[in-house]
Amino acid sequence: MQIYKLLSVLLEYPDQELIDHLPEIPEKLAQCVDIDEAEQRALCEFIDYLARRPLTELQATYVQTFDMTAENSLHLTHHLFGDDKNRGPALIDLGELYKDYGVEVVTNELPDYLPLILEFAAYLDDNEAMVFLSDAHKVLKVLAENLNNAGSPYARLLSIVEGRATLTRLAA
C-alpha cells in the first residue's frame, strides 16, 4: 500500500466501506517501508479517530470541514484562483497531464480535487510524486495550517501531504 493511495482514501468522504476496512490498515501500515515513524503515528491516530465515531458524525464533520468552509476546500486551484477565469485553464492542464500518463479519471470531481491528485501521485515513482506535489506546496501548507487552526483531525493528513510535497526530500 503506497502512502499516497492511503491518503487519497482517507481524504475522501467517509463511507461504510472505509469503516469496514479500518481494522486492516494499521497492519498494512506496519509493513510499509515508504512511511516514516511520525507519518505512521499520525495515520494511526487518524484511523483511531475514524474508528471511534459513528459514520454519520464523520460524514457531518467532513461536510462541515471541506464543503461548507471555503478556506478548507480540497479543490486546490480554488485556493489559487477562486472563481477567476484562470482556474479553467489550470484544470484543463491538470486533466491533460493525467491523460498524458494514461490515467483515466472516473469520478465526477474536478482534476484539482486533492484525493484525485493523491491517487495520481500513487501512480508515479516517489521522486516524480514529490516533484508533482511540490507544485502545490504553498497551497498544501495553507490548507494544512487552516485545518490545524480549526482543530480538525484532517490536519494530520494534510501535514503528511505537505511534508512530502517539497523538493528538499530529494536530497534525503
Image (tube, rainbow, N blue to C red):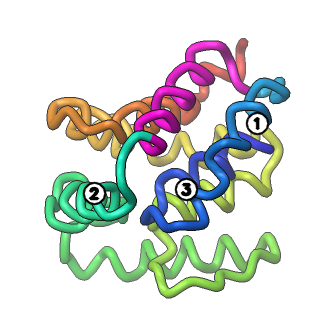
Q: Real-space Cα distance between discs 2 and 1?
A: 37 Å
Looking at the image, residue 67 lies above or below residue 114: below
Count of marks overlaid on the render = 3
* Principal secondary structure, stretch drawn in magenta: helix
Residue count near mark 3 (Cα–Cα under 10 Å), binned few <14, some 14–19, many ≥20: some
Nearer to us of marks 2 and 1 is 2
Q: Position of residue 22 (x, y in %)?
A: 62, 47
> Looking at the image, is mark 1 or mark 3 earlier in the sequence?
3
> Looking at the image, is mark 2 or mark 1 earlier in the sequence?
2
Q: Secondary structure at mark 3?
A: helix
Between 120 and 43, the residue placed more toward the observer is 43
Q: Position of residue 60 (x, y in %)?
A: 24, 63
Q: Which residue is mark 3?
A: 19
Mark 3: which amino acid? Ile
The residue sitting at 73% across, 43% down in the picture is 24
The residue sitting at 45% across, 78% down in the picture is 110
Residue count near mark 2 (Cα–Cα under 10 Å), binned few <14, some 14–19, many ≥20: few
Q: Position of residue 31 (x, y in %)?
A: 84, 27
Q: Real-space Cα distance between discs 3 and 2?
A: 12 Å
> Looking at the image, is mark 3 or mark 2 earlier in the sequence?
3
- Can residue 79 be seen here? The reply is no
The residue sitting at 24% across, 53% down in the picture is 72
Circles 3 and 2 in contact, beta carbons < 8 Å: no
Q: Which image quarter: residue 9?
A: bottom right
Q: Which residue is mark 1?
A: 127
Does the stretch in magenta take in 140? no
Quadrant housing the C terminus: top right
The magenta span reads 35-51
Q: Position of residue 159 (x, y in %)?
A: 43, 30
Nearer to us of marks 1 and 3 is 3
